[in-house]
Amino acid sequence: GQNIDQPTEMTATEGAIVQINCTYQTSGFNGLSWYQQHAGEAPTFLSYNVLDGLEEKGRFSSFLSRSKGYSYLLLKELQMKDSASYLCAVTIEKLSFGAGTTVTVRA
Amino acid sequence: DGGITQSPKYLFRKEGQNVTLSCEQNLNHDAMYWYRQDPGQGLRLIYYSQIVNDFQKGDIAEGYSVSREKKESFPLTVTSAQKNPTAFYLCASTPSGASYNEQFFGPGTRLTVL
């Protein structure tokens, strides 16, 4: 299997920035995805990194370092609606998901 | 509109009964997947199918069965052999078996076994 580690919970203030880290140990790695999941709902796709570096998409950015087995998701200008679980997923033959990081945004 | 449907949203069954969860997609996607999610945990892959009439076991296939007779449909049967079936079940699809980077998910079925 793959070891995918991410923090369990994070709390931040509305308007702030939060960085969610994800580390993985696997072979045959193809890429890394981030998904957002609101409570009781299905995950929705946020980003996919296959090359090293930062990919920016509006308020969300995702970074990957293949040599370090490390990725992060950066959420800027936090809004209350960003309160959700964020899942890191490693692509090998198929997707393998981390346990998710629950982000709580407070006013 | 295109999408993935799962029904019902909530399902209750007695222990020892088999139950089948439906998953239908009209996205013309080749590959379909079933995941299980337990509280505080990530998604775990049960079964996946990359083409009609073919499917493979995922990481936790024991106690489950699937069929893929049509491209649009990928039903999951939770059998009485599954030790702890109460969970949130999610179906997903991708355009082809190689497009693992973005999966499209259905709304999920929350199964409770009493």
Image: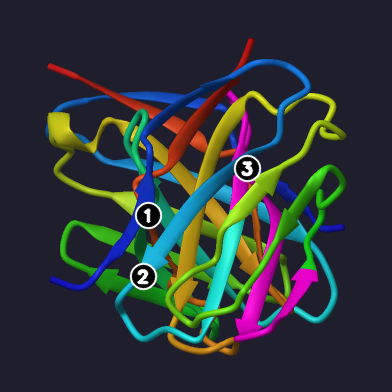
- Asked which secondary structure carries label 2, the reply is strand
Question: Magenta span covers which residues?
Answer: B35-56
Task: Establish if A44 lies above or below A16.
Answer: below
Between A82 and B2, the one lying in front of the other is: B2
Q: Which residue is mark 3?
A: B36
Q: Chain of mark 2?
A: B
* Cα gap from disc 1 to disc 2, whole angstroms: 9 Å
Amino acid type indicated by mark 3 = Arg
Seen at 63% across and 84% down, the residue is B50
Q: Which residue is mark 1?
A: B106
Between B70 and B40, the one lying in front of the other is: B70
Q: Position of residue B78 (x, y in %)?
A: 70, 41
Give the mark nearer the N terminus: 1 vs 2. Answer: 2
- Asked which secondary structure carries label 1, the reply is loop
Seen at 50% across and 86% down, the residue is B30
| Magenta stretch, overall SS | strand
Task: Establish if A38 lies above or below B33.
Answer: above
Seen at 40% across and 74% down, the residue is A54
Magenta segment: does it hold B53?
A: yes
